[in-house]
Each structure stands twice: as structure tokens, then as C-alpha cells.
């Protein structure tokens, strides 16, 4: 009964935080978009604006509600979102914003899921190795790699990998999520994986750094703890100590960090997809910003907020469930 009460309180607390976060993000995003110097009509029509009459231009402005004050447009948009779950119509795709996000997110999800999985696994392994052999040549090499990649922008890493493996060696495709002239439905699994390989490697190589450095520090702390020193005194080897004593103490922080890094992963995918012309949600975000697609930009902002929030909420929940030393009331204070 007590656990059910605590779980209900935790969910209510997280729901309240999500609602407050969405309100703040909505206000800030709409304000910034309204203050943008980009004219949505000019961005949408381009040079064609010179060829249309004032009546047609007025119809376009009225259709998008740009003839209304910003405050009124905001409350109309909020009302449609709350009452009808309607995020509006995308200007550049001429489809409902929810449809555009759903289509693009499926493509981005494959990229982010593979990069997230690879960065977590390899980062954890490298962190354990560096922590076990602290001060050795292996530790120094791993730290050098982590420090370099942690300070490397994802778009620069993508350009380097693109120039090496696609341009120079010709091993991977230059752009896209499937071969030109092929639709997503007709492309084979290998073609999807072949086009996914380089963008996922770009995000993974950078994402590994944070997990590696964090796991290394936790591993060093575990290896210097009293119970590990006692195990060493009994003659137990490094492998046995790492498997039986250290792993259970460093796995939980690594898992928590991995879920909490979804925001950085989403931000990195925006730049990586732009480099590789990968038709995911990140590329749609850039196009919406450049071409002044306000409804799509606001919709993606809200969606990314929910996506990152749930990643952090899952990390909090796992931390409270997997570590018996953490009481549920403490989880409610997160």
C-alpha cells in the first residue's frame, strides 16, 4: 500500500513538472519565433513573392494567421493544442505538424537508438578498462580519446568521417537514408543499415566520451573502496573484483547518465542529419528554422521537450528502483 502511494505521488510530481516545463518552453519558443527577423511568407515563397499580387499575399497571411497580434496567435495555438491536440499545419510540407513529426521521428529513432546503444556499451567498457588500469598507457590513451571527442562538434566529426569513408574510400553512401530513386518502403534492410552506419558512428564516437569518463571515475572510486581492498588482500584478481564487487556499484550511475543524455543525443542528431542529408526530425528542425515554418518549429520543440523529459524521468525511476538504498520519498523530491 505504501509503495502504491509513493508511486502515485512520484507520477503526480513528474506530471506536474512536465506540464510546467511545457508551459515555459511554449512561451519561450513562441516569443523567440515571433521576434525572429525571418519573414515566414518570404521564406516560404522565396523569389515567387515578386510574382504574386497583394490579394494573394493577403490570403496567405490570413491563412497562417499572421495578420493577428502575436499574443492572440499564441492563445489560439495553445487552445488548438490543448483542446484538439492540433499542432497546426506545416508550411513547407503542407501536412499536419503531427504527421510530419511522426514520419521524421521514425527515421531519426533508428539513428538515435543505434547511436545511443553503441555509445553506452563501448563507453561503459572503455570506462571500466581505464578505471581498472588507472595511470597506465591504456588509461592515458582512453582519456585522450575521450577528451578529444568530448570537445569535438558532431558536424565536424561527421564531415571528417564523410570525407574519409565516403569520398576517399567509397565504403559508405554520401547522403540520405536510402539509395536515390528508392523509397523507404522499397529499400532493403541492408540499404537502410548501410546509410545509417556513418551518421550513427558520428553520434556514437562523441557520445562515448561522457560515459567513458564518468564510468572511469566511478570505477576508480570503487577500486579504492574498503571492500575492494579487502578482496585484494584475500588474493582475488582484478577481473574477479571488477565482476563481483565494482560492476554493481558503477552500472547504476552509468545507466542513469545514459538516459539523461538523450537531450545531447537529440541535439547532436540535428547537426549530424544536416551533414549527411539524413531525412529525420533533426533535418526537419533546421529546415523549419531556415524557412520560417513556425507551426512545425513549435511542434518539434514541444516534442523534443517531452522526449528529453521522459529520458530523465526514466533515469530517475531506474535509480530509485535499482538501488534499494534509495527510499521512494527521496525519488519524489527529484
Image (cartoon, grey):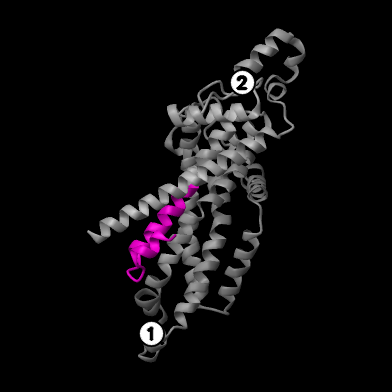
Residue 7 in the figure: left or right of residue 63 = left
Q: Secondary structure at mark 1?
A: helix
Q: Are marks 2 and 1 in contact (CB under 8 Å)?
A: no
The N terminus sits in image quarter: bottom left
Residue 132 can be seen, yes or no: no
- Residue 321 highlighted magenta (yes or no): yes
**Mark closest to the chain's N terminus, 2 or 1:** 2
Q: Which residues are magenta?
A: 308-334
In the rendering, at what x and y percent does residue 211 appear?
Answer: 51, 62
Residue 224 can be seen, yes or no: yes
- Residue 282 highlighted magenta (yes or no): no
Residue under the point 36% across and 78% down: 240
In the rendering, at what x and y percent does residue 209 appear?
Answer: 57, 61
Using a 10 Å C-alpha cutoff, classify the residue at mark 2 as few (fewer than 14 neighbours), some (14 to 19) or many (20 or more).
Answer: some
Residue under the point 52% across and 22% down: 95
* Pick the front one: 304 or 184: 304
Total number of numbered discs in the rendering: 2
* Pick the front one: 211 or 15: 15
The extreme right residue here reads: 50
**Mark 1, residue position:** 227
Residue 109 in the figure: left or right of residue 295 = left
Relative height, residue 80 to residue 12 (above, below): above
Q: Secondary structure at mark 2?
A: loop
Residue under the point 38% across and 84% down: 227
Residue under the point 53% across and 25% down: 88
- On the image, which quarter does residue 28 sit in? top right
**Mark 2, residue position:** 65
Q: Which mark is residue 58?
A: none
The extreme left residue here reads: 1
Determine the CA span between mark 2 and mark 1.
67 Å
In the rendering, at what x and y percent does residue 173 appear?
Answer: 58, 38
The C terminus sits in image quarter: bottom left
Amino acid at each position: 500500500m505504501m509503495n502504491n502511494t509513493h508511486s502515485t505521488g512520484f507520477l503526480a510530481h513528474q506530471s506536474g513538472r512536465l506540464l510546467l516545463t511545457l508551459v515555459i518552453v511554449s512561451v519561450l519558443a513562441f516569443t523567440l519565433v515571433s521576434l525572429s527577423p525571418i519573414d515566414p511568407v518570404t521564406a516560404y515563397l522565396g523569389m515567387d513573392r515578386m510574382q504574386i499580387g497583394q490579394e494573394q499575399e493577403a490570403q496567405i497571411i490570413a491563412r497562417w494567421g499572421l495578420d493577428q497580434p502575436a499574443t492572440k496567435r499564441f492563445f489560439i495555438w495553445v487552445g488548438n493544442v490543448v483542446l484538439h491536440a492540433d499542432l497546426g499545419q506545416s508550411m513547407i510540407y503542407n501536412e499536419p505538424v503531427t504527421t510530419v513529426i511522426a514520419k521524421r521521428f521514425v527515421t531519426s529513432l533508428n539513428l538515435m537508438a543505434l547511436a545511443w546503444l553503441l555509445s553506452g556499451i563501448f563507453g561503459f567498457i572503455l570506462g571500466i578498462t581505464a578505471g581498472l588500469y588507472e595511470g597506465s598507457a591504456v588509461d592515458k590513451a582512453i582519456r585522450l580519446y575521450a577528451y578529444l571527442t568530448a570537445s569535438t562538434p558532431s558536424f565536424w566529426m561527421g564531415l571528417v568521417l564523410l570525407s574519409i569513408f565516403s569520398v576517399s574510400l567509397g565504403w559508405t553512401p554520401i547522403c540520405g537514408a536510402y539509395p536515390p530513386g528508392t523509397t523507404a518502403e522499397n529499400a532493403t534492410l541492408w540499404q537502410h543499415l548501410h546509410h545509417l552506419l556513418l551518421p550513427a558512428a558520428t553520434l556514437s564516437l562523441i557520445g562515448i566520451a561522457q560515459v567513458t569518463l564518468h564510468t572511469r571515475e566511478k570505477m576508480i572510486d570503487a577500486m579504492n573502496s574498503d571492500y575492494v581492498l579487502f578482496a585484494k588482500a584475500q588474493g582475488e584478481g582484478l577481473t574477479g573484483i571488477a565482476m563481483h564487487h565494482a560492476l554493481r556499484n558503477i552500472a547504476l550511475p552509468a545507466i542513469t547518465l545514459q538516459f539523461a543524455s538523450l537531450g545531447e543525443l537529440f541535439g547532436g542528431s540535428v547537426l549530424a542529419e544536416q551533414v549527411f542529408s539524413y531525412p529525420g526530425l533533426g533535418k526537419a528542425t533546421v529546415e523549419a528554422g531556415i524557412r520560417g515554418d513556425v507551426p512545425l518549429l513549435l511542434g518539434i520543440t514541444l516534442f523534443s521537450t517531452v522526449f528529453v523529459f521522459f529520458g530523465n524521468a526514466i533515469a530517475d525511476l531506474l535509480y530509485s528502483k535499482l538501488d534499494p538504498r534509495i527510499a521512494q520519498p527521496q525519488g519524489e523530491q527529484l
